Amino acid sequence: MSVYRRTYRVGGQERTARRFTVQFSDHNLISRRLSGYPDRKASAEMERKLERLVARRAAGDELPPELTRWTDELPSKTRGKLASWGIIDLRRLSAAAGLLFHVKAYEKALQDAGRVDSHAKLTAGRIRRLAAVAGFETIADVTAERVQRALAKLRTGTAGVAGRGGEGNGEA
């Protein structure tokens, strides 16, 4: 494993990258590189965490909570690379993906299954409205209790988001 700044040429002049690169070997002993941080210490910490992540993956162990939080806070591009290399579980990536991404995929799945377009849009719109009222951003945020509270707000009209067609949503 190593942390370094890459160099590149522009118009014959050698330049140094703003961010450090973290190079490490994955659980299959394949050399991998990820873009780190502009700060060397932060990139070195990233290297240590990647080392722990790879060791856990190689052993087949569960991730400790602090390492799970760290992977959830990584940029989506970095998480995607780690998932594509098999270092983190694809289910974890899916859980951390934005909920609206999944709602859009569900809407498309409804349409692909032959549902009427208006049904797919209405269903997806209802899910988006519920997610907005409940404050859901990822699938991991969804809990039965928060769904029930949001539904109650929508039913009573205290949600701040229109709950039904007709009154309260600008329609006359």
Image: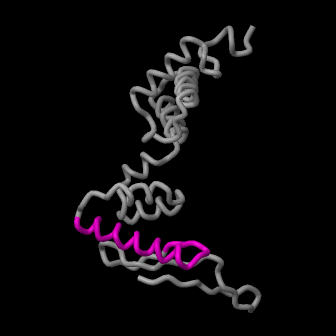
Q: Is residue 100 above or below residue 58?
A: above
**Which residue does the image show at 44% across and 59% down from the upper left?**
70
- Residue 95: image x %, image y %? 42, 45
What secondary structure is the magenta-colored segment mainly? helix
* Position of residue 104 in the picture relative to residue 113 (left or right): right
Q: Which residues are magenta?
A: 34-59
- Residue 112: image x %, image y %? 48, 33
Q: Quadrant of residue 19?
A: bottom right
- Residue 172: image x %, image y %? 75, 7
Q: Quadrant of the N terminus?
A: bottom left
Q: Is residue 135 above or below residue 91?
A: above
**Which residue does the image show at 73% across and 85% down from the upper left?**
10
Q: How many marks?
A: 0
The stretch drawn in magenta includes residue 50: yes
Q: Is residue 78 above or below residue 3?
A: above
**Which residue does the image show at 74% across and 91% down from the upper left?**
13
Q: Is residue 143 above or below residue 31?
A: above
The stretch drawn in magenta includes residue 58: yes
* Position of residue 22 in the picture relative to residue 13 (left or right): left
* Position of residue 145 in the picture relative to residue 162 (left or right): left
Between 49 and 126, the residue placed more toward the observer is 49
Q: Quadrant of residue 140?
A: top left
* Position of residue 84 in the picture relative to residue 103 (left or right): left
Q: Quadrant of residue 56?
A: bottom left
